[in-house]
Amino acid sequence: MNIPSYPSRLLETAVNEFAKLPGVGRKTALRFVLHLLRQEKGESAMLGESILELIRNVRYCHSCNNISDTETCSICSDSSRQHHQVCVVENIRDILAIENTQQYRGVYHVLGGIISPMDGIGPSDLNIRSLEEKLSAGRVNEIILALSTTMEGDTTNFYLYRKFSSYPVKITILARGVSIGDELEFTDEVTLGRSILNRTPYIIPK
Amino acid sequence: MNIPSYPSRLLETAVNEFAKLPGVGRKTALRFVLHLLRQEKGESAMLGESILELIRNVRYCHSCNNISDTETCSICSDSSRQHHQVCVVENIRDILAIENTQQYRGVYHVLGGIISPMDGIGPSDLNIRSLEEKLSAGRVNEIILALSTTMEGDTTNFYLYRKFSSYPVKITILARGVSIGDELEFTDEVTLGRSILNRTPYIIPK
């Protein structure tokens, strides 16, 4: 398939820019652009303006690196949360996922990525130093490692564990085990093996 | 699934705007926005700016309604094309598709939609009057109906045929038949029936 030549340079530029988004090809990009042209102008301009406003004014919480409108994000500035309990996550999507469970009342620390030699991302590219500062200041007594269960996630977990094991802090990790709703016969053997090793006392569900 | 509350109003606005695009949900929208935030600022701003520039400066060809940077689009101002042959299409995506075949050397007329009572789109919402003016002026001797082979497309074809049959103009329609590469046994019976009725003389392929 050769790339069709667009009848307008403005259209072509917009299509090219949309096609840079993850998972968006040129056909989808053209569909987005034609949708914007079909809509009322003010409505469509809002997308462009919201992008520019976000990029120009976005701020990151000085404590946890979460995206925030203020210097300290709403989670870090919430005095009802446990500030000595820090959940280490890769990005803000993970914060949204954990907040959605309504099971966690501590605070977060966003690394901004995970160690991935294949992508050229090393420990120095992540927000690790600011986490270490919190530990040095003695403001933390538990770190919960909540990274992906991939090789990169495991590498990062191991790196953080080695780095922080000298501090008087409890280092925990999310439980790995059989997913709720899964059938045993279809659970992969590594997960099933871990779930036997890490078995927990049976508690009658409420 | 309840909608998670975003840590930043700017982020939320951008996600909401992206989620208005066709086929984009809130999760995909968040992925787009985080991608823009991860990128270099100038790079991401280009998307926002290209949208605003397109919306503010977009023009439509005064002759065929195709999107254009100039008053007359590149196709209508190309003197090597057959200006008395007009291909009627729904939108500019169809122009790109037909141009891609490199089989057509006439000009186009973009209706801007098709008659669809379910969506409240009637003949008065389409660019039909300007097509009629071209016919009245005697500048056209063939109209090629190139609309979708859906009920709405057929309705529009019929409407245009009735409206223009009094003019001294040949009205043709794209051939319907078995797709190239299709197996007969999997072709639907309506298409197969049409392809028998509309059979053409066999020509040895070049």
Image (cartoon, coloured by chain):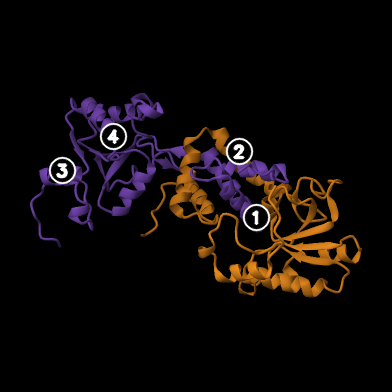
Chain colours: A purple, B orange
Q: Amino acid at mark 4?
A: Met
Do the residues bearing badges 4 and 1 touch, measured as CB atoms within 8 Å? Answer: no
Q: Amino acid at mark 2?
A: Met
Q: Give the mark nearer the N terminus: 1 vs 3.
A: 1
Residue bearing mark 4: A151
Please tell me how crowded label 4 is: few (under 14), some (14-19), or many (20+) other residues with Cα within 10 Å.
few
Which residue sits at x=56%, y=54%? B181
Q: Give the mark nearer the N terminus: 4 vs 1.
A: 1
Q: Is residue A149 left or right of residue B206?
A: left
Do the residues bearing badges 1 and 3 touch, measured as CB atoms within 8 Å? Answer: no
Q: Position of residue A120 (x, y in %)?
A: 40, 26
Query: Looking at the image, which is closer to me, B16 or B25?
Result: B25
Q: Amino acid at mark 1?
A: Gly
Quadrant, the C terminus of chain A: bottom left
Does B200 sit above or below residue B33?
below
Query: Looking at the image, which is closer to me, B88 or A86?
Result: B88
Which residue sits at x=14%, y=44%? A193
Q: Position of residue B70 (x, y in %)?
A: 80, 46
Badge 4 sits on which subunit? A
Residue bearing mark 3: A194
Please tell me how crowded label 3 is: few (under 14), some (14-19), or many (20+) other residues with Cα within 10 Å.
some
Residue bearing mark 2: B46
Separation (CA) of disc 2 from disc 3: 47 Å
Q: Amino acid at mark 3?
A: Arg
Q: Secondary structure at mark 1?
A: helix
Q: Give the mark nearer the N terminus: 4 vs 3.
A: 4
From where the camera sits, is residue A138 visible? yes
Q: Position of residue A121 (x, y in %)?
A: 38, 27
Query: Looking at the image, which is closer to me, A117 or B37?
Result: A117
Residue bearing mark 1: A42
